[in-house]
């Protein structure tokens, strides 16, 4: 019985370790995104984001143009848009995507799902501020 208990405990430890190995830190996933921006966006502390990190920066363009580019880029990377959360206008945009199948974001609270949130705010004609982060729903 002791040998069986030891084997079961060891097996459970391996399963837990293997499961944890598939969860990627939010910072790594964000930095790995291929976003349609001229230069990489710098990291920024984000208190409510999974991993407390986001990408944030200013770029040229319009909300409509950025929306189309983000949709294409992220869909090609395996992300699925939650269209119910999509809102855009001359003021900016809000997009929410489910990560590709099999992607797990480290630090997501139990019972929650991590989604990729992209928000852009128009700062002036042809100038936007884009923020990209994972949030738990």
Image: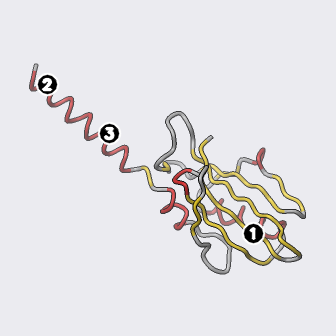
Q: Nearer the viewer, residue 87 or 107?
A: 107
Q: Which mark is residue 16?
A: 3
Q: Tell me the residue at 46%/56% (across/down).
A: 25
Residue 117 found in image quarter: bottom right
Q: How busy is the neighbourhood of tag 2: few (under 14 within 10 Å), some, or many (20 plus)?
A: few
Label 3 SS: helix
Q: How busy is the neighbourhood of tag 1: few (under 14 within 10 Å), some, or many (20 plus)?
A: some
Q: Which residue is mark 2?
A: 4
Q: Tell me the residue at 30%/44% (across/down).
A: 17
Circle 2/circle 3 CB separation < 8 Å: no
Q: Tell me the residue at 62%/73% (across/down).
A: 41
Please tell me whether mark 3 or mark 1 is closer to you in this view.
Answer: 1
Label 2 SS: helix
Q: Point out the image quarter for the N terminus.
A: top left
Label 1 SS: strand
Q: Which mark is residue 129?
A: 1
Q: Position of residue 54 (x, y in %)?
A: 60, 61
Cα distance in 3D space between marks 2 and 3: 18 Å
Q: How busy is the neighbourhood of tag 3: few (under 14 within 10 Å), some, or many (20 plus)?
A: few
Q: Earlier in the sequence, mark 2 or mark 3?
A: 2
Please tell me whether mark 2 or mark 1 is closer to you in this view.
Answer: 1
Q: Earlier in the sequence, mark 2 or mark 1?
A: 2
Cα distance in 3D space between marks 3 and 1: 40 Å
Above or below residue 48? Residue 2 is above
Q: Position of residue 20 (x, y in %)?
A: 37, 46
Q: Residue furthest top?
A: 1
């Amino acid at each position: 019985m002791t040998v069986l208990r030891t084997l079961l405990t060891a097996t459970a430890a391996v399963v837990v370790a293997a499961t944890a190995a598939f969860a990627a830190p939010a910072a790594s996933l964000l930095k790995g995104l291929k976003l349609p921006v001229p230069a990489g966006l710098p990291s920024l502390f984000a208190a409510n984001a999974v991993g407390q990190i986001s990408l944030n920066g200013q770029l040229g363009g319009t909300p409509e143009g950025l929306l189309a580019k983000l949709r294409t880029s992220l869909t090609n990377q395996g992300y699925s848009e939650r269209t119910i959360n999509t809102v855009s206008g001359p003021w900016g945009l809000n997009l929410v995507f489910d990560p590709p199948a099999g992607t797990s974001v480290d630090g997501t609270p139990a019972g929650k799902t991590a989604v990729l949130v992209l928000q852009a705010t128009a700062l002036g004609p042809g100038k936007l501020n884009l923020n990209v982060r994972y949030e738990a729903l």
